[in-house]
Image: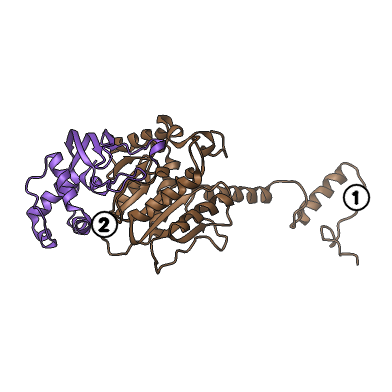
């Protein structure tokens, strides 16, 4: 699971109001090279929830060099683009879990795939 | 599974798509070709702005990532959701570019609001019409699915869901469930006059969209690029050939004067009493009125 996905995921247990963002419990992190595409970064940037992204990056150990609150102008900086790209698309959570901030329910992540299946009483 | 039997009737999706079934989706070239062409058509119906920018898309029921590959080829980034762990394992093995999530569409999508530029789904959503566990209520599951899908999409985005409805009622039920949560749009049926090539696409829009999708083959034409269609043409050609060469008598041309003269000569040699040859020999009789 990439941080991009983490940024999009939200807890869908019925009745949960503040199921975003998931806290990450790290078991194993790996890095896969991804194609560097500045166009996509520009397109996705306004939609990234930055505090959630920073929180995820902190947990995955790739927080370094990412500014607290960047503006669109920062996107022209190649240095920033590289760091953003790396944290967003290349760092992958292989094993661990996602914890719902409201209920504390854990969704296990195994082989890089988060298991978001609910029990029948949760939906 | 026998021919004509629907997988929905065999077992729930998480059980039906086991390792064996998942393996088929990587080795069976026919399945791969069908998935790829359906995805291309879904992308066409998605009508993303033609500015060449990469988009953030959702692939519902992504399976082993065949449809996702077509999305990657078109330059988009995607997130895949599927209920079958075996299918997702195959997808991970093939190192598809999109990220994968294990989840049940009927539980709703675990996504935050307004994050996606569009969604596609190939041959998956009809599974929602089945109650596979005692607690399942298809209507509730459909409602939950469409509600959360509506939320996950940005304003002006579309969702194109290719489905295999079992009957007319099922198709109507899905459309009605989608409309109820606020989607606009409807069903696009490609090749409606063909039993084999007929394909259903549920095209849903968040808010209004100017471009109206157009179904293919409304004039009764068949798809051109399918191998089966080509085979039908071949069979037709053989039949024509047979008609021309085979068989004894009849036909519009007849045998001709030379053939008649030869036969008469043969019969004379055998000693039969045969009428003498004349200018009328081998001619067609005039029709008696």
Image coordinates for residue A47, horizontal then vertical, percent:
23, 56
**Distance Cα–Cα, label 2 vs label 1:** 88 Å
Q: Residue at x 86, y 43 (%)?
A: B269
Which chain is disc 2 placed on? B
Q: Nearer the viewer, residue B191 or A51?
A: A51
Disc 1 packing (10 Å; few <14; some 14–19; many ≥20): few
Q: From the viewer's perspective, is residue B17 above or below residue B217?
A: above
Q: From the viewer's perspective, is residue B1 above or below residue B284?
A: above
Farthest residue to the right: give it.
B273
Please state if B270 lies on the left or on the right of A103 as rendered: right
- Mark 2, secondary structure of its residue: loop
The residue where tag 1 is placed is B274
Identify the image quadrant of residue B17: top left
| Res. B27 visible in picture | no
**What color does chain A have in the rendering?**
purple
Whichever of callouts 2 and 1 sits on the residue coming sooner in the sequence is 2
Q: Residue at x 11, y 62 (%)?
A: A73
Q: Which circle, 2 or 1, is nearer the viewer?
A: 2
| Res. B155 visible in picture | yes
Picture disc at residue B54: 2
Q: Nearer the viewer, residue B174 or B243?
A: B174
**What color does chain B have in the rendering?**
brown
Which chain is disc 1 placed on? B
Q: Residue at x 33, y 34 (%)?
A: B89
Image coordinates for residue A102, horizontal then vertical, percent:
26, 42
Q: Residue at x 40, y 67 (%)?
A: B208
Question: How many numbered callouts?
Answer: 2
């Amino acid at each position: 699971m990439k941080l991009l996905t983490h940024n999009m995921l939200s807890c869908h247990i019925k009745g949960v109001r503040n199921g975003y963002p998931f806290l990450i419990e790290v078991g194993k992190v790996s890095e896969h090279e991804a194609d560097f595409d500045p166009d996509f970064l520009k397109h996705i940037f306004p939609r990234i929830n930055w505090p959630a992204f920073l929180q995820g990056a902190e947990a995955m150990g790739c927080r370094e060099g990412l500014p607290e609150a960047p503006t669109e102008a920062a996107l022209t900086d190649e240095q920033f683009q590289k760091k953003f790209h790396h944290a967003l698309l290349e760092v992958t959570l292989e094993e661990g879990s996602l914890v719902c901030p409201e209920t504390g329910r854990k969704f296990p992540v195994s082989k890089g795939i988060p298991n978001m299946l609910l029990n029948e009483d949760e939906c | 599974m026998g021919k004509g039997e629907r997988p929905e009737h065999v077992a729930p999706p998480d059980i039906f798509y086991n390792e064996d079934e998942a393996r088929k989706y990587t080795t069976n070239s026919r399945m791969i070709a069908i998935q790829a062409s359906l995805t291309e058509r879904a992308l066409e119906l998605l009508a993303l702005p033609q500015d060449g920018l990469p988009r953030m898309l959702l692939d519902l029921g992504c399976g082993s990532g065949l449809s996702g590959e077509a999305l990657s080829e078109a330059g988009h980034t995607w997130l895949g959701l599927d209920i079958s762990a075996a299918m997702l394992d195959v997808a991970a093995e093939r190192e598809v570019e999109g990220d994968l999530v294990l989840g049940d569409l009927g539980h709703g999508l675990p996504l935050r609001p307004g994050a996606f530029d569009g969604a596609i789904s190939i041959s998956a959503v009809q599974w929602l019409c089945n109650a596979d566990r005692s607690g399942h209520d298809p209507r509730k599951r459909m409602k939950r699915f469409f509600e959360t899908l509506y939320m996950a999409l940005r304003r002006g985005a579309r969702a194109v869901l290719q489905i295999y409805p079992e009957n007319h009622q099922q198709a109507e039920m899905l459309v009605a469930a989608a409309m109820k949560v606020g989607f606009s749009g409807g069903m696009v049926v490609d090749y409606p006059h063909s039993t084999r090539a007929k394909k259903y696409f549920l095209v849903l829009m968040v808010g209004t969209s100017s471009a109206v999708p157009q179904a293919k083959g409304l004039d009764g034409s068949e798809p051109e690029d399918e191998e089966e269609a080509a085979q039908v043409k071949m069979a037709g050609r053989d039949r024509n050939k047979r008609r021309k060469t085979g068989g004894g008598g009849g036909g519009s041309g007849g045998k001709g004067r030379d053939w008649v003269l030869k036969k008469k000569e043969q019969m004379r040699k055998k000693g039969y009493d045969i009428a003498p040859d004349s200018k009328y020999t081998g001619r067609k009789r005039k029709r008696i009125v």
